[in-house]
Amino acid sequence: MDLADGAEEEEFRARLREWLADVLPTLPPKPDPLDWPGRRAYDCGWQRRLYDAGYADVHGNAPPTQRLIFLEETERAGAPYVGANFVGLLHAGPTIAAEGTAEQRERWLPPVLRGDEVWCQGFSEPDAGSDLAGLRTRAVRDGDAYVVSGSKIWTSHAEVADWCELLVRTDAQAVKHRGITWLAMPMDAPGITVRPLRTLAGSTEFAEMFLDEVRVPVANRVGDENDGWRVTMVTLSFERGTAFVGEVVACRRVLAELAGAARKNGTWDDSGVRRRLGRLSAEFRALWRLTQWNVSEAQAVGGVPGIGGSVFKLRYSHARQELYDTAAEVLGPDALDLGREWNLDRLSSLSYTIAAGTSQIQRNIVAERILGLPKGR
């Protein structure tokens, strides 16, 4: 697919730039990064502005070129990111669009696009580690509902969410991958306890979640019972293949700022620093091209990214860490001051080789599904 701007894309880019120039100065002040209820309100308010202006569809049915232009222009303009809407817009929403029924798409997608409802991700469990298929949270069918008991950890945005994309085991006798089901669980259902987890940076965007006989309607099941592993692979394809693309643009902006800071404080005179900055520039340019390829391929095959997303996620995670390690070198002793630019981002970057599937898992996927190597024993 040719991703160069044509006349239609140029018009879209110009119109978006004009709208951003008008609306960004009218936004309220950003909330404290540690105030997640405040951040939810801010992020959902921004999403509503996008919806009212006709730009919310970039996360839905817009052509891939328009989506990439949107990400480029909003990041360059310093517009808010999806924030608390991350799971709904980039994980659960696309999964429901691809795998849900017409009724489910009508129920859940419009509120996500309007910023009315926030989703969290209930995948990881305390005893499973990187073995997602080793989950133990049980769901037993009782009439028109599943009764769910168990626990989740690293549940993204649980304390401010309305819904949870939840993986449960519906067949305790099945081989690991075969007894899993994907449910949409209302977070106000009785029996749910959420305990926020504080990260190294002091934020609480993750939580432990305990489920004690929570009743989830069977109508909230996406896909067939015990077919949740396949549906989950669709979710993870979006998470690894397209959910991070806006961050690539952000990293390219940070890299330019970092080079400017190095010139000002003298670290630019260090040839090693210049070499790392140059290599990172090439790295992120290549990742942006890979992003374009992944998005266009997904469009060509019906909207679901392929396994190329694992290549992207693997390399992006490490490139991001290298970027902020280089930022620490440029800052010198100021890298210990959490009030200084880039230092909180450096702490958060440590999680990227674990989140959305560890780098070890991504290497296995690349080895087995792309290179055709045999499975390890």
Image (tube, grey):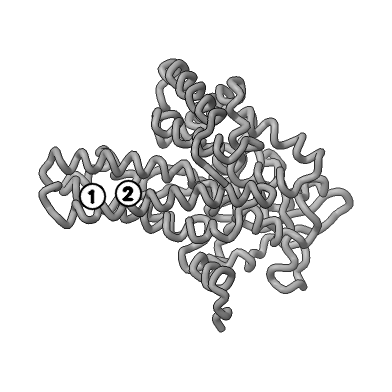
* Mark 1–mark 2 CB contact (< 8 Å): yes
The residue that appears at 63% across and 28% down in the rendered structure is 114
Q: Nearer the viewer, residue 76 or 356?
A: 76
Name the N-terminal-most of marks 1 and 2.
Answer: 1
- Judge whether 40 appears above or below 187 on screen: above
- Residues 66 and 105: in front is 66
- Answer yes or no: is residue 210 visible: no
Residue topped by disc 1? 328
Residue 295: horizontal and vertical position, in percent? Answer: 56, 47
- Tally of numbered discs: 2
**What residue did someone put label 2 on?**
346
Tell me where residue 306 appears, x and y as whole percent: 60, 57
Does residue 72 appear anywhere in the picture? Answer: yes
Which residue appears farthest toward the bottom when viewing the image?
377
Q: Specify the amino acid type for callout 2.
A: Arg
Element on which disc 1 rests:
helix
Give, as a three-letter code, the residue at label 1: Ala
Label 1: few (<14), some (14–19) or many (≥20) C-alpha neighbours in 10 Å: some
Could you give the CA–CA distance between mark 1 and mark 2, rounded to whole angstroms?
A: 8 Å
Q: Position of residue 249 (x, y in %)?
A: 41, 41
